[in-house]
Image (cartoon, rainbow, N blue to C red):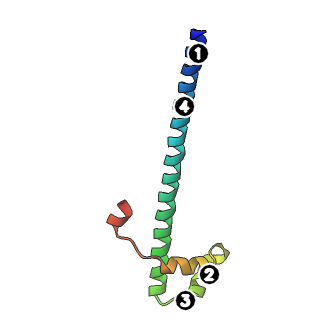
Amino acid sequence: MREALDARRRSQMEAERRQATLAVTVLSAIAERQAAVAAADDAAATAVQALLGEGLELADIELLCGSTVGLKELQRLAKLPLRTPAEKAS
């Protein structure tokens, strides 16, 4: 009887360790995704704002990008504050 209880406890502990490891993997992957999205937004915002600086209108930029980027997304990117390299690293 005691051996069966010990085996069950060991099995539960192993399952908890596996689950904790998988949870860390989930959290790490989500953090990496968020960092990648932030980096992509920074790059796109920088480019959109540079195009605006060259005198283009958002509608012109929309035409340049084809149907890939809509006006609402371009408006969002145009309003994003540009982050310094130090801010991007944190």
Question: Which of the 4 image quarters holds residue 88?
Answer: bottom left
- State which mark lies toward you, 1 or 4: 1
Q: In this view, does 66 lie above or below 14?
A: below
Question: Between marks 1 and 4, how big is the CA–CA gap?
Answer: 16 Å
Question: Between marks 2 and 3, how big is the CA–CA gap?
Answer: 11 Å
Q: Is residue 82 above or below residue 19?
A: below
Q: Mark 4: which amino acid?
A: Glu
Whichever of callouts 1 and 4 sits on the residue coming sooner in the sequence is 1
Residue 63 rendering spot, x and y as whole percentages: 63, 82
Closest to the observer, 67 or 75? 75
Neighbours of disc 3 within 10 Å: few (<14), some (14-19), many (20+): few
Closest to the observer, 50 or 32? 32
Residue 81 rendering spot, x and y as whole percentages: 42, 76
Q: What element carries label 1?
A: helix
Q: Mark 1: which amino acid?
A: Leu
Would you name the residue on which mark 4 appears? 16
Q: Mark 3: which amino acid?
A: Glu
Whichever of callouts 2 and 3 sits on the residue coming sooner in the sequence is 3
Question: Between marks 4 and 3, how big is the CA–CA gap?
Answer: 56 Å
